[in-house]
Amino acid sequence: MVRRSNHLVARISPSSSPSPDVDKSKASGCVHATLSIVSVALASASARREDGDMSSRGRLLVLWNSVEEDIYEKWRDEGPRPLAWDPSRVVPDVGTVDEEMAAFIKALEDARFEVELVNVEDSLDRAIGAIRLHRPDAIFNLVEFFNDDQIQEAYIAGLFEMMNVPFTGNRPMTLATCQNKFRTKLILEAAGLPTAEFLLAKTLPIAMDHGLTYPLIVKPAFEDASGGIEKDSVVHNHLALEARVAYVHKEFEMPALVEEYVDGREIHAAVLGNHPPEVLPLFEMEFDDSEFNPNDEWRPQIISYRAKWDPHSKDFYTMDAVVPPEDLDATLAEEIRRVAREAYIAVGCRDYARVDMRIEDDEIYILEVNPNPDLVDGAAFMLCATASGRSYSDTLGAIADLAIARGKPAPPDPKKVGKPTDTLLLEHQHGKDDNVPKVYNEPPAHYNDPVDSGEPELDDELDAELREHGRADDEAESEDDELDVDDESEEESDEDDASDDMEQESEQAVESNAEEELGKTASETGQAVATPPYASDPMADLEATIPTAPAFSDADLEDKPTPDDES
């Protein structure tokens, strides 16, 4: 699902999808794509192909998930209305999901892709059917929840992997990891990356000597899109801490993540690509609530749920986006980019992600890593891409290209290991000697990528040296191969004639025996021998044997456990 930007012009949505506070539909609850938009988008692509102005870069299947109506569309239909807290002002018109999806499809078409758009509507059969029907070069994955459960975002990506269909964005492990804020912070901490001190509150009471310094911020441990984040999330004493944790337990039915609150500048780093990933120009979310705080009382500067999604709320009007940040020291900016790149790698991100940070007294603190962030034109990621000189089409096209490239067949690798026993099998096949492929000593594929030390001159030197070593090795291997071929060719030419004669005699004998056996079977039973089931249409018969996904009732899901947590 593509998530909407909710602020007009400078005020934009800097992160993920909505939470259940306003609408039970969560991230997707407000999503609704009409057939007219799909028809117009596909007709446009078809017309361009017929006119000959589209040399296709590939076939894309855009999958998203929507089961509810769009609240922004409902507000628009109701017409302009004054703000309850200031009748002199009118609620701004916020872009609908229909409009954003149409812009998304058009951008991919402008980038010369053939595009099909399918809303899976919480149906596994529909998702699988769309993939089988359209047979895309890649799936542009916009599914961020399934069955009203955000953790199932990872399961859908797993489905694509099991079907062996390339897809954009992050793999299941990364999606599931980053959905768990506590686990993400453990990984960042283990990687030596800076993040505020924290604890996981699974039960009450909380020990008085918990070791954290107030003020603290309390968040639902498995939510995103600022779900459960509001002014009361920041607490200053033990009583308020336990009250807020109890609220999270009750309202969200999950543990609470408690962190030391960092009162500083909020910087987001959009990261694009792989090997190496590129950190785009930085994004800053500025806060200014002076209009609603005449006495200049201290208030936490946070991107609350209301600030992100609700144009009726005062919080909605307290944020502005700036790309790139103003007055940010160049050395500090470079360090922010380094931290963002390492965080992207640490949690296993791929293709694109956003790393959110706070800066206090020139110290960097990672708030969270967002795999598959909002790709709406005007959201934080796209503002950073625009500042890098890329158009909307350029950015979406670059992401799609990464997925399509993964679908291109690679030459077979005899040293590739899958199951744990594959090494033993290779030893058995080759004999336990020095010629056994050292599969367990092979470096990861990305070790062969161009060197990127941050110093261009040194990188060029190292690359040249590596190429020279590779060229020398190749030449030596080539000479050995030529000698072996010369020795073997004479022996093979003598053996070929005899081999052909023996092969022909063997085939005739097999055919004769088979005919006798078939005739004998038919005469004994009085029935014709059945044609092999795969003789006519292998794909149709194979698909007929695959069972459809079972349907679940609400009762089946009543006792659904909360996502597992590892402390």
Image (cartoon, rainbow, N blue to C red):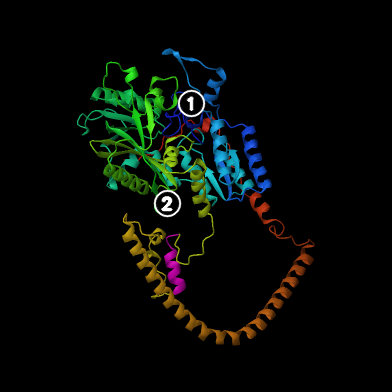
Residue 183 sits inside the magenta stretch: no
Residue 422 sits inside the magenta stretch: yes
Give the residue displayed 47% in from the left and 79% down from the top. Answer: 481
Q: Residues within 10 Å of mark 2 (few under 14, many from 20)?
A: some
Q: Please provide the residue range marked out in magenta.
A: 419-430
Q: In this view of the protein, which residue sits in the foreground, 372 or 153? A: 372
Kind of residue at badge 2: Asn
Give the residue displayed 38% in from the left and 64% down from the top. Answer: 440
Q: Quadrant of the C terminus?
A: top left
Q: In this view of the protein, which residue sits in the foreground, 455 or 567? A: 455
**Direction from residue 93 to residue 41 in the image, left or right:** right
Kind of residue at badge 1: Lys
Q: Secondary structure at mark 1?
A: loop
Number of numbered tags placed on the structure image: 2
The overriding secondary structure of the stretch rendered in magenta is: helix
Q: Secondary structure at mark 2?
A: loop
Name the residue carrying label 1. 24
Which x, y percent locates residue 544?
66, 49
Disc number at residue 274?
2
Q: Does residue 566 appear anywhere in the picture?
A: no
Spatial distance from mark 1 to mark 2, Cα to Cα?
36 Å
Q: Earlier in the sequence, mark 1 or mark 2?
A: 1
